[in-house]
Image (cartoon, rainbow, N blue to C red):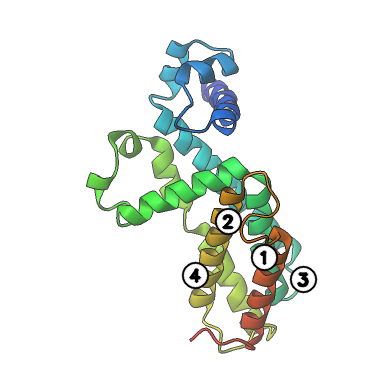
């Protein structure tokens, strides 16, 4: 019972932190404002989350966990369709997710940037004490590769059911799709609330082009190597 209550309280605090971070940004957010938004004292807040950094990692974990659950839902709902259809839906879902969850997409970008700079977390000199000591950082490490694995498996399924060209390298395509999606996130973040981010290009057109290229790659119309 105590564990359930603790998890419920943590969820309330994370919700409050999301509101504050989304409103003023991570750098400008203050722990006292998050505590006030959660309806608790600052002392109580620190008893659950020892730093603002730890709170942001909790949001990042929530973001990645929800993305993974979305991916699993797609795999389940597309199990009677082709592997190619599932792969394209996963790609579209990732872009949709980023468009509708600005804070989450920003948190994911920050996290993967940190991971790259720290050699996948092995170079602890590049990580702060707040990150190293955060249980949420460890939780993220456990699930950070799931989007890759889910996509990879669906590419393999598509090759087996012959909806995807047999020359397609599952891992190469997975990394391609992931890198394009991360690039899409960056464009969305630079756009802010506008629908025309750069050079008068509409996000809908960019999204459509990404999906068209992905389809061509899976069909073998465009070779990746």
Q: Along the line of sight, which residue is nearer the eye, 29 or 67? A: 29
Q: Is residue 3 above or below residue 147?
A: above
> Is tag 3's residue or tag 4's residue first in the polypeptide sequence?
3
Q: Residues within 10 Å of mark 4 (few under 14, many from 20)?
A: some
Q: Is residue 225 left or right of residue 159?
A: left
Q: Along the line of sight, which residue is nearer the eye, 205 or 15? A: 205
Tag of residue 206: 1
In the rendering, at what x and y percent does residue 32 appear?
48, 15
The image quadrant of residue 81 is: bottom right
Contact, mark 2 vs mark 1 (Cβ under 8 Å)? yes
Contact, mark 3 vs mark 4 (Cβ under 8 Å)? no
Q: Which residue is mark 4?
A: 175
The image quadrant of residue 48 is: top left
Q: Is residue 103 above or below residue 2?
A: below
Tag of residue 80: 3
What is the distance, in whole Å, between disc 3 and disc 1 at their CAs? 29 Å
What is the distance, in whole Å, between disc 3 and disc 4 at their CAs? 25 Å
């Amino acid at each position: 019972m105590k564990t359930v209550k603790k998890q419920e309280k943590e969820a309330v605090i994370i919700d409050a932190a999301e509101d504050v971070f989304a409103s003023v940004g991570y750098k400008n957010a203050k722990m006292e404002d998050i505590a006030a938004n959660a309806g608790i004292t600052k002392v109580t807040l620190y008893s659950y989350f020892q730093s603002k950094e730890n709170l942001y990692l909790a949001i990042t974990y929530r973001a990645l966990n929800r993305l993974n659950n979305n991916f699993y839902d797609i795999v389940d709902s597309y199990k009677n369709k082709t592997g190619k259809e599932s792969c394209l839906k996963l790609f579209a879902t990732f872009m949709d997710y980023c468009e509708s969850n600005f804070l989450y997409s920003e948190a994911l970008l920050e996290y993967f940037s940190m991971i790259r700079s720290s050699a996948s977390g092995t170079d602890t000199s590049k990580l702060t004490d707040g990150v190293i000591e955060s249980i949420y950082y460890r939780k993220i490490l456990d699930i950070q590769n799931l989007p890759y694995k889910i996509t990879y498996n669906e590419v393999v399924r598509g090759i087996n059911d012959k909806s995807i060209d047999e020359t397609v390298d599952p891992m190469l395509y997975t990394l391609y799709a992931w890198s394009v999606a991360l690039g899409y996130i960056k464009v969305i973040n630079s756009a802010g609330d506008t629908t025309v981010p750069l050079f008068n290009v509409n996000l809908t057109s960019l999204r459509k082009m990404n999906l068209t290229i992905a389809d061509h790659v899976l069909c073998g119309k465009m070779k990746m190597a």
